[in-house]
Image (spheres, helix red, strand yellow):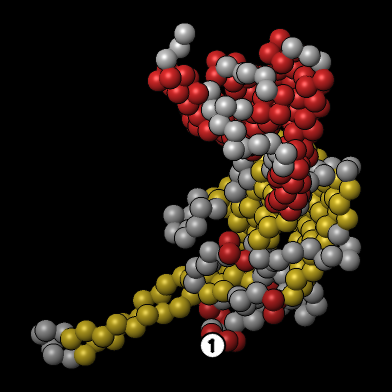
Amino acid sequence: METPEKQTKNSIFQSTTAKMIMVGLLTLVLLIPLQFVKELISERAQRQKEVITETNDKWGKSVFFYGPILKIPYTYYEETVSINEKTKETVKQKTAHTNYAYFFPEELKANTDVTTKALNRNNYESVVFNSNMKFEGNYIQPDFSSRNIPHENIQWNKATILIKTTNLKSIKDEVKINFGKTNFTFEPVYDSEAKDSTEALETGYIDLTKILTNQKIAFNFDITYNGSQQIKMVPIGKTTQVNMKSNWASPSFTGNFLPDDKTKKITTSGFVANWKILHINRAFSQQVFGHLPDLRQYAFGVDFVIPVDQYQQNERASKYGFLVIGLTFLIFFLIQSISKISIHIFQYSMIGLALIMFYTLLISITEHSSFMKAYIISGISVIALITLYSVSILKNKKFPVFIGLSLTALYTFIYVIIQLENYALLVGSIGLFLILAEVMYFSRKIDWSNSNS
């Protein structure tokens, strides 16, 4: 026969409060392996970034472009004054120096066709593109009057046309410009005085005295890039019009200017975007004397980046791990309290570890399949495992069926939240509110005052 002291001790450990504390502590303990799973996801995501960077370096990096720029050298004289020590006379001496004037087009039109594709290496995927860019426009007669430079000091026969860009190694064809009905070929040049990270293409000397007239001088050229992640350009025309189309269905328009909403179209098969930018929309003039400034801050373009990749989706799913474990334990605890069925803390532990296995299955299967397939396979596996295990715990079929349906609804709810971007917080908040309401409804008749329940 048990002593009153022993009966009291057993009563304390079998009480509802004690069980709640143990289940709560177990939930906190399970956060440790859950954190290990999150670190695994982060490690795999970092490895993906390294592979993507390596792949993009070989295929082609981001494309940044502005041009064409008419570059005209001119001579200016610097006067120095010195005193002859012998005669004590003042001697004035003029030294000739060469500087450059840069003139931007009056009109610039660009039509860009971008074809994207996925490159796979091992279990990792990178999005790259091939861009065919066609430019046309015109220049007007260069005006040096603002600097009072005499006509005879201008070296009209040594003008060149310049393009500032990045990713030179991924240009696929020779670049030629038709300027004033004459073709000129671009060659790479090294600019030691460049104030930005761009590279340069430049033509040979052009004798403007044979080309420039009082009328506008037209030009056109094509340039084809292999690239990745991004295309950006600077609107250097007095009027710049850009049309871009692509098979990429998730463009992110970036930079200092956005496309026209009236003509922009985004569908599942790609997008079409148009920009029209005037010189009064940006804070630099149509001509620059001295050195070209860094105009990157005025660039605009498109990012070709996967909006939510598989590792981001896995990371977002793992953030709901605590919620899944807590709600599942709560369901079992309510069933235990209502049905008076005793569930051992070891059995709670097995259920918790099964829930964590969902995330290891998810990340491993995702690397060999799509996230949706991996989520379905992992979800079905874990739900089936816990449902069958609960049959042996609860000794009937009614409660296990309820648990299986509840877990199915919970995992479906989390999947919907992961897929949503703009409405994830709203849907998540409403869903949690409804879950709380259901818990309050089912727990309303439990007699919490009975310590041995």
The quadrant in which residue 297 appears is bottom right
Question: 15 or 102: which is nearer to us?
Answer: 15
- Across and down, in percent, residue 214 comes to 77, 80
* Residue at image location 59% in from the left, 20% down from the top: 348
The answer to whether 104 appears left or right of 27 in the picture is: right
Q: Point out residue 403 in the picture as x, y percentages from the top left corner.
A: 76, 25
The one nearer the camera, 426 or 226, is 426
405 left or right, relative to 237? right
Q: Which residue sits at x=62%, y=66%? A: 298
Of the pair 119 and 326, the residue shown nearer to us: 326
Q: Name the residue under label 1.
A: 148
Q: SS class of the residue under badge 1?
A: loop
Amino acid marked by disc 1: Asn
Please tell me how many numbered marks the rendered image carries. Answer: 1
Above or below: residue 132 compared with residue 109: above
Q: Point out residue 292 in the picture as x, y percentages from the top left corner.
A: 53, 66
Q: Residues within 10 Å of mark 1 (few under 14, many from 20)?
A: few
